[in-house]
Image (cartoon, helix red, strand yellow):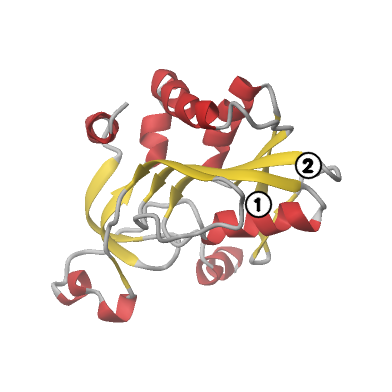
Amino acid sequence: MTNEEILSIFKSTGALLEGHFKLSSGLHSAQYFQCAKVLQYPEYNEALCKIIVEKFSNHKIDVVAAPALGGIVVAQEIGRQLNARTIFAERTEGNMQFRRGFQIFEGENVLVCEDVITTGGSIVEVIELVKSMKGNVAGAASIVDRSGGKVKLDAPFQFSILTLEIENYQPENCPLCKENIPLVKPGSRVTSTEDRNVRK
C-alpha cells in the first residue's frame, strides 16, 4: 500500500485525529494517530502487519515483543503471521517489565514492535529489557513513525510502514495552549501523577 492509501484508511476509520493532544511522551501536537481505531478491523490489522512481516521474511524471529498497551495488537498479529511467540512489557513503578510469566530465553531472536513512535521512549525501554535478558534484538518495527525517521533505535534493522514528520511541542511552548484550544489526552499510558491520583 502507498502512504496515501494508508492515510486514507486512518482517516476513514477516524484514527487520524485533528485538534490539541497530549501524547504519551508528554509532548503536545495538533495531530494524533489512534492506531487502535484502525487495528480494531481484522482486515486492516492483517494487511498492515503483513507489510512488516514481509520486511522481516529473511530474519529468523523467535519472539515478537511490544510495549503495552498500543503495541500489543500489532505484535500479536505479527507473531501470528510469523508463527512466533508473542509477549508484551508493562509499565510498573515507572519501568517497563515483562510480567505474567513472560520471559526471553538467552539467544532468542526478538522483533520489537510498536503502534506509533513519537520519541521512541517505550520501544527503547523494551529493546533494553530484551537485551538485559540476553535476547538478540533482530529488529524494530512500527505502524507509524511520526518523528520523520529522526528516532534511531538500537536495532540492526528498523522499519515503519508510515513515516511522517509531525510537529510536536513542549507544553510550555505549545502554540495550541496559547490559543486556549482544549487539550485532550487520548492515549493509553497513565502518567505517574495520574497513577498516584488513581491510587488515592
Rendered position, 75 above or below 112: above
Quarter holding the C terminus is: bottom right
Q: Which mark is residue 129?
A: none
The residue furthest left is 179
Residue 1 placement: quadrant: top left
Alpha-carbon span between mark 1 and mark 2: 11 Å
Q: Inspect this view and state whether residue 70 appears.
A: no
Q: Earlier in the sequence, mark 1 or mark 2?
A: 1
Q: Which residue is mark 1?
A: 90
Q: Inspect this view and state whether residue 132 appears.
A: yes
The percent position of residue 74, horizontal first and vertical second, equals 52, 34
Q: Which residue is mark 2?
A: 102
Mark 2 element type? loop
**Label 1 crowd bin: few (<14), some (14–19), many (20+), radius 10 Å:** some
The percent position of residue 52, horizontal first and vertical second, equals 50, 32
Amino acid at the residue labelled 2: Phe
Amino acid at the residue labelled 1: Glu
Rendered position, 84 above or below 129: above
Residue 92 placement: quadrant: bottom right
**Label 2 crowd bin: few (<14), some (14–19), many (20+), radius 10 Å:** few
Asked if the residue under mark 2 is in contact with the one under mark 1, i.e. CB atoms within 8 Å, the reply is no
**Count the marks: how many?**
2
Q: Which residue: 69% across, 32% down? A: 61
Q: Which residue: 24% across, 74% down? A: 174
